[in-house]
Image (cartoon, coloured by chain):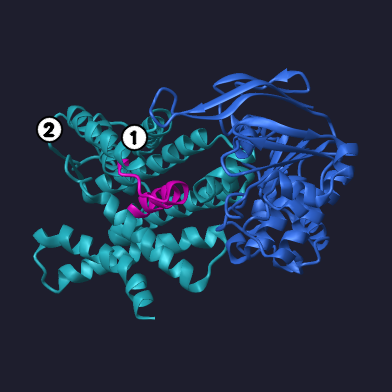
Chain colours: A cyan, B blue
C-alpha cells in the first residue's frame, strides 16, 4: 500500500532520470512539502480533493526552482537539488509550525470511496485509482511530440538543440512535473499514515530510485520498448521495493536499521548487473 | 544565403592559453552553394561551422542569413534554417528512442513540440519510404532503438532526418570521420543527392582530400583562423588532386 502511495514519486524520479540521467535530490524536500501542506490544510478543514492542486503546484514550483538554478546559473544538477532541498526543510518547518502533526479525526482522501468492509481494500482502491489516472496521463504525455522531445533531451542534448528544442525549458518543465508528482506522493502518504513528520522525506529519493532501478532492470531484461509499459514496470518496481522492505522487517531486522537496509538494497540492485558483467 | 562579417572568435580571452580560433573572417556563401572546408587541425573549420550553427557565440562580427542578423540567436532557434550532421554519429541521434521517434523530432525541427500524438501510421509509412531509399534494409526496423544501429547506419539516418522538415542550410562536420570507407561513400553520395534535390546551401568539413576534390561547388582552405585559399566552381573543377596534397605539405 505504501508502495502504491510512493509510486507517484517513482514516476517523478523516472522522468528526472530520463531527462538528467541523475536522480533529483529536490525530491526529499518536495515530498515533505506535499505532506506538510496536506497536514496544514486538512487541519484547516479543507476538503481533501481541493488540496491536490495546491500540493502539485507547490511541488512544481520547487522543481522549477531546482531547474532554474541548474540551467540558468549552470550549477550542477545534483547540487541544485541539494540546495533547494535544504532550503525547503526550513520552509516546511515554518509551514508546519512544529515537527509532527497527527491527522486524526479529519476527512482524508481515503474517506470518500469505501465500497469494501475492510478499510485496507478501500485505501488500496483509492491508491490504485490515483496511480491509474497518473500513469495514464503521463503515459500519453510521454508518447506525444512534446514527450518525445523531453525524453530526447537527456538522451542526446546536442541533437535536441540542433532540432529546435529549448533544452533549458525542457529540463525545468520536467523537474516541475517530477516534483509535482513527488509532492503528490507526500500528500497520499501523509493521509495514509495519518500524520506528517518533518523528517519523513529524508532519503526518500533513494526509495524512489530503488523503484526506478528495479523497473529499469526489468525493462532491460525484457527489452521493453513501449513507454507506457515502462511506466507500468516502474510502478511494479515501487511496489516490489516496499514488499522487500516489509519482508526484511518481518524477519526481525531492527526498524532503526531501515535506512541502512534500503541503501544496501539499492546498492545491490545497482551492482548486480555490473558484477555479472565483470564475471562474463 | 550565409554572410559572415569580420568574425572574430577568441577562446579563453585574457588568459595565458588564449586562442584566436577565427581571425577577422568575412565570407559569403551563396544560396545553393556546396562549400567544402579543408585545413589542418586547429585551423578554425569547426569553429566556423559552430559560429554558423550558433553553437558558439562570436567574440565580434556578425552572422547574417539572407540579410537577417542572427548573431544573437541561440542554436535551438537557428535550427529553423539549419540541419546538421555531427562528426560523432551519437550526437545527431537519441540512442534510447526508436528510429521512428528520432524521425518525428526531426520532422518538427522548425515547429514547436506540442502535447499531441504525432507518431501515427501515416507518419510511419512516410519514414519507411524515406529510409528505404538508402537500401540498407532499415525500413522494417523503425520501432527499434536508434542505439542498436551501427555508426554508419545512424549517420545515414541523421542525413535523412535533416530533410524531414524544411531546411535551407545543411552543415556537415566531418560526417564520415568515424566510418569505414564503404559507409563513408554512401553518406557522401546521399548528402550530395539530397543537396541537389532540395537545393540546399551546404558546408562540408572533411580531412579526406579525395572527398574534398570530388564533392562541392566551392572549396576553402583555412589556416590559423583565416581563409587561406578560396576557389569557386570553375577553379575547383580545374583543381588537381595532387595540387591539393601540396597545400598540406
Asked if the residue under mark 1 is in contact with the one under mark 2, i.e. CB atoms within 8 Å, the reply is no
Is residue A7 shown in magenta?
Answer: yes
Name the spot of residue B243 as percent of width and height, x first.
79, 47
Give residue A174's position: percent from left, percent from top.
46, 41
The answer to whether B110 appears left or right of B50 in the picture is right
- Of residue A188 and residue B115, the one placed in the foreground of this image is B115
Q: Position of residue A129 (x, y in %)?
A: 44, 53
Q: Chain of mark 2?
A: A
User: Whole-Å distance between the Cαs marked 2 and 1?
Assistant: 22 Å
Classify the position of the N terminus of chain A by image quarter.
Answer: bottom left
**Residue visible at 65% across and 53% down?**
B101
- Queried whether the magenta region covers residue A48, the answer comes back as no
Q: Is residue A233 above or below residue B160?
A: below
Give SS at disc 2. loop
Give the magenta-colored segment's residue range. A6-26
Q: Is residue B159 left or right of residue A4?
A: right
Q: Visible in this render: residue B117?
A: no
In the figure, residue B35 lies in which quadrant?
top right
Q: Identify the residue at horizontal 43%, vertical 46% (top origin).
A: A20
Residue at the disc numbered 1:
A47
Identify residue for label 2: A98
Question: How crowded is the residue under tag 2: few (<14 C-alpha within 10 Å), some, or many (20+)?
Answer: few
Q: Can residue B178 be seen in the rendering of this structure?
A: yes
Amino acid at each position: 500500500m505504501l508502495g502504491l502511495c510512493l509510486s507517484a514519486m517513482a514516476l517523478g524520479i523516472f522522468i528526472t532520470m530520463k531527462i538528467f540521467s541523475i536522480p533529483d535530490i529536490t525530491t526529499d524536500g518536495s515530498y515533505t512539502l506535499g505532506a506538510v501542506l496536506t497536514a496544514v490544510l486538512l487541519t484547516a478543514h479543507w476538503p481533501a480533493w481541493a488540496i491536490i492542486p495546491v500540493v502539485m503546484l507547490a511541488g512544481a514550483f520547487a522543481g522549477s526552482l531546482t531547474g532554474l538554478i541548474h540551467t540558468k546559473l549552470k550549477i550542477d544538477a545534483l547540487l541544485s537539488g541539494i540546495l533547494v532541498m535544504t532550503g525547503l526543510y526550513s520552509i516546511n518547518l515554518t509551514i508546519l509550525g512544529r515537527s509532527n502533526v497527527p491527522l486524526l479525526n479529519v476527512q482524508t482522501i481515503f474517506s470518500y470511496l469505501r465500497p469494501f468492509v475492510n478499510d485496507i481494500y478501500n485505501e488500496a482502491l483509492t491508491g490504485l485509482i490515483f496511480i491509474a489516472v497518473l500513469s495514464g496521463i503521463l503515459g500519453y504525455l510521454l508518447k506525444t511530440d512534446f514527450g518525445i522531445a523531453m525524453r530526447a533531451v537527456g538522451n542526446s542534448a546536442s541533437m535536441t538543440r540542433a532540432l529546435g528544442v529549448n533544452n533549458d525549458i525542457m529540463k525545468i518543465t520536467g523537474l516541475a512535473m517530477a516534483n509535482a508528482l513527488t509532492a503528490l506522493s507526500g500528500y497520499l502518504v501523509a493521509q495514509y499514515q495519518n500524520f506528517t513528520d518533518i523528517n519523513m522525506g529524508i532519503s526518500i529519493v533513494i526509495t524512489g530510485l530503488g523503484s526506478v532501478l528495479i523497473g529499469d532492470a526489468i525493462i532491460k531484461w525484457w527489452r521493453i520498448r513501449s513507454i507506457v509499459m515502462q511506466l507500468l514496470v516502474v510502478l511494479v518496481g515501487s511496489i516490489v521495493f516496499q514488499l522487500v522492505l516489509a519482508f526484511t522487517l518481518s524477519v526481525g531486522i531492527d526498524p532503526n536499521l531501515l535506512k541502512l537496509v534500503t541503501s544496501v538494497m539499492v546498492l545491490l540492485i545497482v551492482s548486480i548487473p555490473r558484477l555479472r558483467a565483470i564475471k562474463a | 544565403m550565409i554572410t559572415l562579417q569580420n568574425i572574430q572568435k577568441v577562446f579563453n580571452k585574457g588568459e595565458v592559453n588564449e586562442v584566436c580560433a577565427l581571425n577577422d573572417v568575412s565570407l559569403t556563401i551563396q544560396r545553393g552553394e556546396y562549400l567544402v572546408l579543408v585545413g589542418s587541425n586547429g585551423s578554425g573549420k569547426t569553429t566556423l561551422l559552430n559560429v554558423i550553427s550558433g553553437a558558439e557565440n562570436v567574440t565580434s562580427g556578425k552572422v547574417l542569413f539572407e540579410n537577417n542578423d542572427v548573431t544573437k540567436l541561440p542554436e535551438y532557434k537557428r535550427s529553423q534554417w539549419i540541419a546538421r550532421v555531427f562528426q560523432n554519429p551519437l550526437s545527431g541521434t537519441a540512442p534510447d528512442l526508436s528510429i521512428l521517434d528520432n524521425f518525428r523530432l526531426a520532422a518538427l525541427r522548425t515547429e514547436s513540440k506540442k502535447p499531441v500524438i504525432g507518431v501515427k501510421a501515416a507518419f510511419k509509412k512516410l519514414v519507411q519510404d524515406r529510409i528505404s531509399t538508402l537500401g540498407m534494409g532499415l525500413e522494417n526496423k523503425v520501432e527499434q532503438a536508434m542505439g542498436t544501429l551501427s555508426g554508419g547506419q545512424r549517420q545515414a539516418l541523421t542525413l535523412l532526418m535533416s530533410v524531414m522538415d524544411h531546411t535551407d542550410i545543411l552543415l556537415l562536420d566531418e560526417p564520415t570521420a568515424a566510418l569505414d570507407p564503404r559507409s563513408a561513400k554512401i553518406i557522401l553520395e546521399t548528402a550530395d543527392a539530397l543537396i541537389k534535390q532540395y537545393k540546399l546551401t551546404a558546408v562540408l568539413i572533411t580531412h579526406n582530400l579525395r572527398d574534398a576534390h570530388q564533392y562541392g561547388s566551392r572549396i576553402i582552405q583555412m589556416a590559423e583562423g583565416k581563409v587561406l585559399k578560396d576557389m569557386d566552381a570553375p577553379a575547383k573543377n580545374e583543381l588537381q588532386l595532387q595540387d591539393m596534397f601540396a597545400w598540406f605539405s
